[in-house]
Amino acid sequence: MKLSAALLLLSQLAVSQATSGRLKEPSSNNNVSNQRTRYAKASKTGKSGKEERDYFNRVSNFFICSQIGASCTEDDATSAEIVAASEDGMTLIYTDAEKGGVGSVDITDYANPKGTGFIPTSGEPTSVAIRGKYAVVVENTSQDYVNVSGQLHVFRLSPMTLMHTIQLDGQPDSVAWSKDGKYIVVAIENERDEDLGDGGLPQMPPGFVVVLDASDADPSKWTRTDVDVTGLPGVRFPEDPEPEYVSINKDNIAVVTLQENNAMVLIDLKTKTVVNSISAGEVTLTNVDVVEEGVIRQNVSITKYREPDGVAWADNKHFIIANEGDWVGGGRGFTIFHKDGTIVYEANDDLEHITAAVGHYPENRSENKGNEPENVAVGMLDGKPAAFIVSERSSVIFVYDISDVTEPKFIQVLPAGLSPEGVTFIASRNLVVAACEVDDRGIAARAVISIYKTKKSELPSYPTITSLWSQSDIAAPIAWGALSGLSFGSEEHKLYSIEDSFYSSSRIFKIDTKNHPAIIEKTITIMDMNGVLDAAYPGVFGNADKTVNLDQEGITLDSKGYLWVASEGSGTAASGTPNILVKVDSTGVIHKVVPLPDDIAAKQLKWGLEGVTFVDDGSESGALIACLQRPWSGMDHPLILAYSIGSESWDGYLQYPLDAVESPNGGWIGLSDISFYNGMAYIIERDNQGGPDARVKKVYKFNPFDSAYTWQGEVINKELVYDMMPKLEEVSQGLTPEKVEGLAVNDKGMFIMNDNDGVDDYNGATYLEFIPWL
Ligand SMILES: *[C@@H]1O[C@H](CO)[C@@H](O)[C@H](O)[C@H]1NC(C)=O
Ligand SMILES: *[C@@H]1O[C@H](CO)[C@@H](O)[C@H](O)[C@H]1NC(C)=O
Ligand SMILES: *[C@@H]1O[C@H](CO)[C@@H](O)[C@H](O)[C@H]1NC(C)=O
Ligand SMILES: *[C@@H]1O[C@H](CO)[C@@H](O)[C@H](O)[C@H]1NC(C)=O
Ligand SMILES: *[C@@H]1O[C@H](CO)[C@@H](O)[C@H](O)[C@H]1NC(C)=O
């Protein structure tokens, strides 16, 4: 790498002053008015609202695996599906169908929840409810779908002691306990066999609803009444109702969803009679995505049965259903009904649009049910009734102010673990708790119970990025995900980012970071207008409409205003696609394609180009430095390569010595993004593990102009700049993201960011964090 002696001296001097290598924690850069006005655009129902109000923030995640071993280094799958809290709000009980039992958690200190034990049960627990000193747990003990059975266990709390068991004679899916403690209601689903025929209804035996009279302090004196819910109007297959979920209001009216039947029934618990049955009806979703082609295009109108799963009373007259759509439906939102059957509010495509705006839209579920709202709880926020709707596929909780049930106001979106199922509001302590069920160490996902709390005058820390309403003809926000690299733009506060090959029509994003959350304000679609890429690699990267399908992993802006994108190859030199640098102008048109030097490209394995950064080396056009993620065939270390823009030639390479840290889960360590600032190259070194298995997430630096390097393969000296682990653990409450793939450094500090994998096998959280220099 050639550069003038004067520049070398200058850059080295500047480095020693500006980058002492120590960084301080970011200061809060929240701006309420900005937050409200921008973010509200994600939802058509959002009103700008008042500026000062309370919000929820996640305060901790309880890892279910910690009940087995504190370090969570066991492979045993656990789960948390439904969670309930004791009346004093200090104890949580959750169902773990994976291990077959129930666990308890002490949340006296909600920021530091402690596992207090696991009790195995004989079958598969499906739900739990708590009143006073008892927890009731229902479980499925069925042999199969035809010979059905179930039980309700009564446990005394602290310590959990089994007091009594009641036979249910069917497969229970949900349980609720009335506020006055008098009644317990169990939805006996007797679920269909999805593999029998086409999984369609009817399938005998039919489900029913159990009402227990629980007035007596002694559970052995409780009496059971079965309520027949067959043959009711408004139900698609009245002979096979399939009761799913239940909620009880203050008048002791239970609302029970019949998901596959697209209906709800109301039962008066005093008389144990059905007082109404209501069809959930169909919803015409205005602008949603129904095609899984690797592009989020929310411009299709579809009509679907709502097929509600979870339900909760909003007040004594209205209830909210979460329109999951387990069978042929998929309402993708929520609906509020009056108990007389009138719809007072329909969210339509709002939840789909909010998930798109905050990077949580699951493109891979477009042909199914999109974000899949699974459950709902009602509580309070800022002194007003609020609804908390959990999205199973987007792994978020939507928070709405429902003081006017005919016009709920979207307030915020909360991050969760992978696949939240159960949600509950703890009135005595103003906490929201969600049980997130997926537990698979192989994909860095662990089941957690996420806990959220409001604090006076604390703004939402999540999301860290949202987007503006789309400027194209699509009536939806700019949808984004899988952000895999960062670069500063020419304007202050502006970043460029890119999406990786999860999406098939590669775009560059312009992000305004002035306020929190940062705003994706513009997309630039990369176009091979002049056939430059297709001429170099016919049919490899191009789409028919001249868009391209790159695996973008790095981006940088050069001194002439061109953007350079590093596209990672797939597979080996013999069978994969190549690693290339692509030069595009500010409108996205490709001007040039640069393959790696032949001798290096010949050694290609997986894990190729991960970052690229522009370097002012004193030449007229400057240079680029790019990095490979891991060592290729026959190499000891990953390579750092230099490319001269002016002479259009590769200028040699260095080798980067990776940390040697043992991964508890057999993971590897490699490089991610690279960013040049003030004479130094900053680089991310990370392992491929997340959550409790993450060990290495670091930013190192080296001096590319060091006279000891002739760029003929020397091994560099690296210096630790910042250990990202504490910060990432803090912002994610222990759900440390695996793929920290964005880095941009300037005179104020550095931005770091993770890739959310397009919300596929990951909870979808994107953390864009600014770490200022000390
Ligand atoms: C917050 O953002 C708004 C809108 O962009 C702006 O008018 C206001 O000056 C900002 N306030 C602060 C304190 O930065
Ligand atoms: C639960 O019920 C299903 C059928 O509804 C059955 O196939 C399954 O084996 C049951 N699980 C347990 C643990 O009893
Ligand atoms: C039905 O299941 C119960 C246990 O759940 C078992 O005892 C019984 O033998 C089964 N009956 C048939 C006919 O398989
Ligand atoms: C979607 O899911 C499939 C199967 O899990 C996976 O192979 C694919 O890469 C995913 N992504 C997209 C964009 O389809
Ligand atoms: C949705 O948008 C895409 C791309 O802009 C277009 O090809 C398609 O025809 C649109 N579909 C509808 C139903 O408008």
Image (cartoon, rainbow, N blue to C red):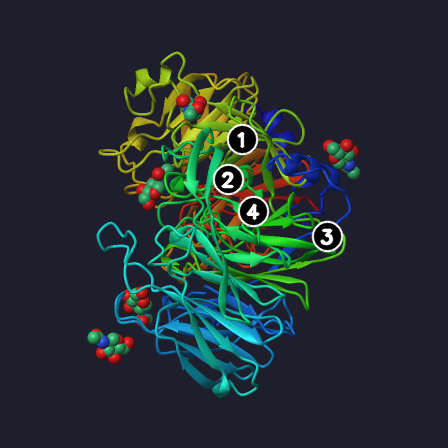
**Mark 3 residue's CB less than 8 Å from ligand 1:** no
Cα separation between marks 4 and 1: 28 Å
Given contact means CB atoms under 8 Å apart, are the residues at marks 3 and 4 in contact? no
Discs 3/2, front = 2
- SS type, badge 1: loop
**Mark 4 residue's CB less than 8 Å from ligand 5:** no
Residue 98 location, quadrant: bottom left
Give the numbered dot on residue 476. 1
- The residue positioned 58% from the left and 81% from the top of the image is 133
Residue 13 location, quadrant: top right
Q: Quadrant of ligand 2?
A: bottom left
Q: Return the residue nearer the eye: 423 or 763.
A: 423
Given contact means CB atoms under 8 Å apart, are the residues at marks 1 and 2 in contact? yes
Crowding around mark 4 (Cα neighbors within 10 Å: few <14, some 14 to 19, many 20+) is few
Q: Is residue 593 left or right of residue 107?
A: left
Q: What number of labels is visible?
A: 4
